Amino acid sequence: MNLIRKILFPFAILYGIITSIRNFLFDKDILKSYSFDLPIVVVGNLSVGGTGKTPQIEYLIRLLSDNYKIATLSRGYKRGSKGYILADKNANVKLLGDEPFQFFEKFKNIQVAVDANRKNGIEQLLSQKEKPEVILLDDAFQHRKVKAGFYILLTSYGDLYSQDFILPMGNLRESKNGAKRANIVIVTKCPATLSVEKQDSIRNQLKLSAKQELYFTFIAYNEFIFGENQKIKASKIQVNSKLLVAGIAKPQPFFTYLKNINDVCLSFPDHHNFTDKDILEIKKLAQNKIIITTEKDYVRLKGNLPSEQLFYLPIQSKFVANNDNSGNNFDKTILNYVGTSSRNR
C-alpha cells in the first residue's frame, strides 16, 4: 500500500460509512426501491471498471434472445446526450455511448436503451407497444432504486473485491458486504486452465453464502479480426507489423494476445472519446500498417480512420470447465429464473 493511499484512509472510512448507511436504508425499506412485473437481471461489480461487464451482458443476450424479447438498459457512460433514449436507425455512438451502441450494432433482435435513471428507463421501455419480456441492467449493482429479480456480481481474477478497499483508498464503490446481494458471483478474466485447487482457494477467500453460486470465466479471443468489408485470421496478422489501439480499463491482455516485437501499442483511458488530435496521432503512427482495436473502441473510431486499415478483435466470455460449476449450470440458473418469473407474471 503506497503512502498516498494511506493518507486517503480517513476519506475511505467516511465514504464507507455513507454507502453503508445508504444500503441500510434501502435494506430496511426506509428508502424506496421499485419492483417491476418482469424478469430483470443486473450485471455489475463492486469495484471501479474493468471486470468484463460487456462480454457478460452479451453472453446473456445470446442465451436469452432466441426465446424472449430482450432489452438492455445502460446509463450510457460518456455519451453526449441526456435522459432516456431508445436506439433506432438514427442512433450513433455519441448518442448512446460506446457499449450500448456496440450492443445495438451487434444484436439486431433486441432493444437497446440508455438512461442514468434506471427506474425511469424501465418505465419508458414498458410504456412501449412492443414491451420487452426481459431487461438486462448493465452496471447497476449500486442502483438500489430498482429492485431487480436477479443480481450477477463480477470480480476480476487477481483483483478480487475481497482483497480490495473502499474508494479512494482502494477501488470499491461500496463495502464488501454488498456482495451479499448477489445471486451469482463470477470471477472473470481467469486463465482458461484455472485449476480446481485455485478455484477452491478463491471460493474460500470470497466466503459466499450457501445460496450464492460461484463461477469462473475467461476471455476468449475470436480467431478473426474484422473490418468494415473483410475479415482476416488473427494468426495471419500476428507476425505482421501493426498498430494496436485500446481505450479500455485494462488493455494489456489485448496487447499481449496480438503483439509482436515490431508492433506499436497505443493506450487511452477507458471509454475514451477520440479527438481530432488523437486521430492524427493514430494515422501518423499507423502509416500503411493495419490498425487493430477493441470492439468497443471500433465503434468510436469507425468513420474516422481508413476502413481498409481499421479492424477490431471480438471477445467472448466463456466459462472455465469443472465438474461442479460449468457454464451449463449457469445457463440453467438464468433460464430457470427468467422462465419462472415470466410464468408468474
Image: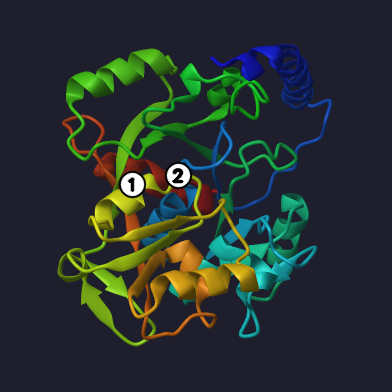
Q: Is residue 70 above or below residue 9?
A: below
Q: Is residue 232 above or below residue 190?
A: below
Looking at this view, is 15 or 277 the one in front? 277
x%, y% of residue 41? Answer: 54, 47
Nearer the observer, 260 or 126: 260
Q: Position of residue 306 (x, y in %)?
A: 44, 84
Q: Which amino acid does label 2 sit on?
A: Lys
Q: In this view, does 177 lie above or below 267?
A: above
Please state which of residues 179 and 130 is positioned toward the viewer in this rendering. 179
Residue, x 65% and y 84% (percent of image)?
A: 90
Left or right of 219? Residue 275 is right
Q: Position of residue 304 (x, y in %)?
A: 54, 80
Under tag 1, what secondary structure?
Answer: helix
Q: What residue lies at 63% left-to-right and 63% top-to-bottom?
A: 273
Q: Mark 2: which secondary structure? A: loop
Q: Which amino acid does label 1 sit on?
A: Pro
From the viewer's perspective, is 256 left or right of 166? Answer: left
Residue named by callout 1: 253
> 282 left or right of 222?
right
Residue closest to the eye, 140 or 128? 140
- Is residue 162 something that shows in the picture? yes
Q: Are the residues at dot 2 and dot 1 in contact (C-beta closer than 8 Å)?
A: yes
Report the disc number at residue 250. 2
Q: Is residue 68 visible?
A: no
Please identify the quadrant where the N terminus is shown: top right
The extreme right residue here reads 30
10 Å neighbourhood of mark 2: few (<14), some, or many (≥20)? some
Q: Which residue is drawn at 26% across and 33% down?
A: 325
For the point 75% across and 12% down, the residue is: 10
Residue 262 vertical placement versus 146 (above, below):
below
For label 1, the crowd category at 10 Å Cα-Cα, with few meaning under 14, some 14 to 19 and many 20 or more, is few
